[in-house]
Image: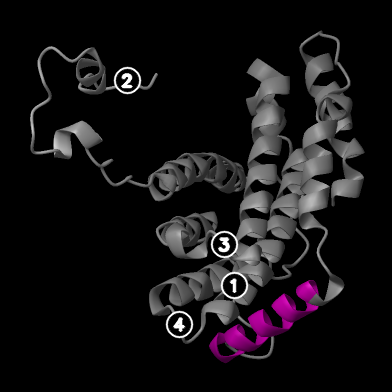
């Protein structure tokens, strides 16, 4: 889906022309963020197959009939699962797959915010176009697919050692995996709920990063033990009042 990024420029030019303006090269302006997201999504092929197979097997028991129920992609479920996982950052922070999840989240968040920045007052117009909706939906599916696989790998690393973080990662795996499951071809009709779902996932990633930064700050703050008192405070005898050397030793040094 990221390879079809030229569709964004087409939509952008159509939006600007409708306002009588001149479109700048939106894709070129987003090049840094797009490249970062591509790198974040570049996992080993077995990651994708593993995530897909386990997601299908974990949800097969809930299907009604051969085709299963109608799919409803729920960005709220993904954001909730991410927020719950963030509560265990002190346990997860050194796990490589969790670090990769944070990289994916950050790259997707930065791309969303860059699109808003570059389109300015016309962002809502862009968001309402069905072609852009299709592109962003495909991008968010790729993001959730990657997160689902990484979450399962994280849970497997922790399984048997840390129950609550493991369960949180299992929930994230299921929520993101459900979001990324294949769906029927979307209708060309622009629906308000599609715009709402797109905004929820994009803004949810941005809001979650604030909480992650706060958690990192708390977990990285180590209270240092108090320094021992200066030697002259630990001596029992008082220095002679007429000794310059004693007076110098009795004056505490101040570190700046």
Mark 1 vs mark 4: give the one in front. Answer: 4
- Secondary structure under badge 2? loop
Which label belongs to residue 99? Answer: none
| Near-viewer residue (15 or 211) | 211
Q: Tag 3: Cα neighbours inside 10 Å, few (<14), some, or many (≥20)?
A: few
Q: Is residue 53 above or below residue 239?
A: below
In terms of sequence position, does the residue under pointer 1 or pointer 4 come before the other? Answer: 1
In terms of sequence position, does the residue under pointer 4 or pointer 3 come before the other? Answer: 3
Mark 3 vs mark 2: give the one in front. Answer: 2
Quarter of the image where the C terminus is located: top left
| Distance from the alpha carbon under mark 4 to that under mark 2 | 46 Å
In terms of sequence position, does the residue under pointer 2 or pointer 1 come before the other? Answer: 1
In the rendering, at what x and y percent does residue 246 appear? 21, 20
In terms of sequence position, does the residue under pointer 3 or pointer 2 come before the other? Answer: 3
Based on the displayed image, in which of its 4 quarters is residue 5 positioned? Answer: top right
The residue wearing badge 2 is 254
- Secondary structure under badge 1? helix
Based on the displayed image, in which of its 4 quarters is residue 43 positioned? Answer: bottom right
Q: Tag 2: Cα neighbours inside 10 Å, few (<14), some, or many (≥20)?
A: few
Residue at point 45% right, 56% down? 86
In the rendering, at what x and y percent does residue 227 appear? 28, 40
| Distance from the alpha carbon under mark 2 to that under mark 1 | 47 Å
| Magenta stretch bounds | 47-63
Q: Is residue 200 above or below residue 156?
A: above
In the rendering, at what x and y percent does residue 236 appear? 8, 38
| Near-viewer residue (112 or 130) | 112
Observer able to see residue 70: no
| Distance from the alpha carbon under mark 4 to that under mark 3 | 15 Å
The residue wearing badge 3 is 94
Observer able to see residue 121: yes
The residue wearing badge 4 is 161
């Amino acid at each position: 889906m990221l390879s079809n990024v030229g569709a964004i420029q087409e939509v952008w030019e159509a939006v600007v022309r409708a306002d009588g303006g001149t479109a700048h090269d939106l894709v070129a302006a987003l090049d840094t963020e797009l490249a970062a997201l591509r790198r974040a999504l570049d996992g080993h092929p077995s990651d994708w197959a593993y995530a897909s197979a386990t997601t299908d097997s974990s949800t097969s028991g809930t299907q009604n009939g051969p085709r299963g129920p109608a799919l409803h992609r729920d960005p709220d479920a993904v954001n909730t699962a991410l927020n719950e996982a963030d509560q265990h950052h002190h346990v997860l922070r050194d796990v490589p797959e969790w670090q990769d999840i944070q990289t994916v989240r950050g790259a997707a968040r930065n791309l969303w915010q860059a699109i808003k920045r570059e389109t300015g007052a016309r962002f809502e117009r862009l968001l309402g176009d069905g072609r852009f909706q299709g592109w962003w939906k495909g991008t968010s599916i790729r993001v959730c697919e990657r997160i689902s696989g990484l979450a399962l790998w994280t849970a497997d690393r922790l399984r048997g050692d840390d129950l609550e973080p493991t369960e949180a990662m299992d929930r994230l795996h299921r929520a993101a995996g459900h979001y990324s499951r294949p769906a029927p071809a979307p209708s060309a009709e622009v629906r308000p709920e599609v715009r709402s779902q797109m905004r929820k996932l994009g803004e949810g990633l941005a809001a979650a990063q604030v909480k992650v930064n706060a958690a990192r700050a708390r977990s990285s703050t180590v209270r240092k033990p108090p320094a021992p008192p200066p030697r002259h405070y630990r001596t029992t005898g008082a220095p002679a009042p007429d000794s310059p050397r004693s007076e110098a030793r009795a004056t505490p040094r101040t570190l700046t």
